[in-house]
Amino acid sequence: MKSTLEGRGYEVHAKWGKKSGSDILAMIGGTRLVIEAMGEGTFRQILGNYFLNALGEILQRMSASGMEYGIALPAHPSYVKLVLRASQAGYRSLAVEFLFRETDRNNA
């Protein structure tokens, strides 16, 4: 996700590991994008837990005006189903974008 955003001209600050705060802060012009990133689990149940955790984390970060918010997920079919199954109206109300990324299974 970091390299994708940098390729689009964003200045990207990513936190790796279990550091507190948002996982990615990307800036371009006057736009500041806060992203929570989740990895790919091994079981469908874990993916569901990661998905709900990402929603909770991004909701806690929604404190500043003038920010955009997103959740980055691997392009795993289970994640796609979870996003599509939830209320699209709710996502619009929250102004949360979902960003799917392909994973490199050799470096996972």
Image (cartoon, helix red, strand yellow):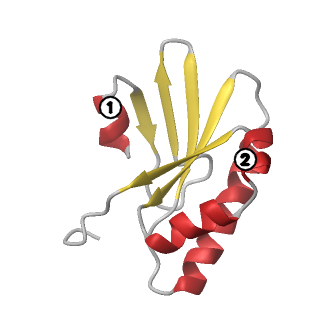
Q: Which mark is residue 61?
A: none
Rendered position, 42 above or below 5? below
Please tell me whether residue 90 is drawn above or below residue 65 in the rendered image: below
Three-letter residue code for mark 1: Glu
Mark 2 or 1: the one toward you = 2
Q: Quadrant of residue 64?
A: top right
Q: Is residue 84 above or below residue 49?
A: above
Point out residue 55 in the picture as x, y percentages from the top left corner: 70, 57
Disc ID at residue 91: 2
Residue at horizontal 29%, vertical 71%?
108
23 or 20, which lies in front? 23
Q: Residue at x 72, y 50 (%)?
A: 88
Q: Is residue 1 above or below residue 17?
A: above
Q: Position of residue 99 (x, y in %)?
A: 49, 48
Total marks in image: 2
Mark 1, Cα crowd under 10 Å, few <14 / some 14-19 / many 20+, is some
Image spot of residue 31 (x, y percent): 56, 19
Which numbered marker is on residue 6?
1
Tell me, yes or no, whether the two marked residues, 2 and 1, touch with CB atoms within 8 Å.
no
- Report the residue at 77% width, 42% height from top: 94
Q: Secondary structure at mark 1?
A: helix
Nearer-N-terminus badge (2/1): 1
- SS at mark 2 in the image: helix
- Determine whether, in the image, residue 92 is placed left or right of residue 41: right
Image quadrant in which you'd find residue 107? bottom left
Q: What's the residue at 25%, 71% (across, down)?
A: 105
Q: Nearer the viewer, residue 94 or 57?
A: 94
Hey, which residue is sitting farthest left in the picture? Answer: 106
Say what amino acid the circle numbered 2 marks. Tyr
How many residues crowd around disc 2 within 10 Å: few (fewer than 14), some, or many (20 or more)? few
Q: Position of residue 97 (x, y in %)?
A: 60, 43
Kindly report the distance in space between the C-alpha atoms of the residues bearing marks 2 and 1: 25 Å
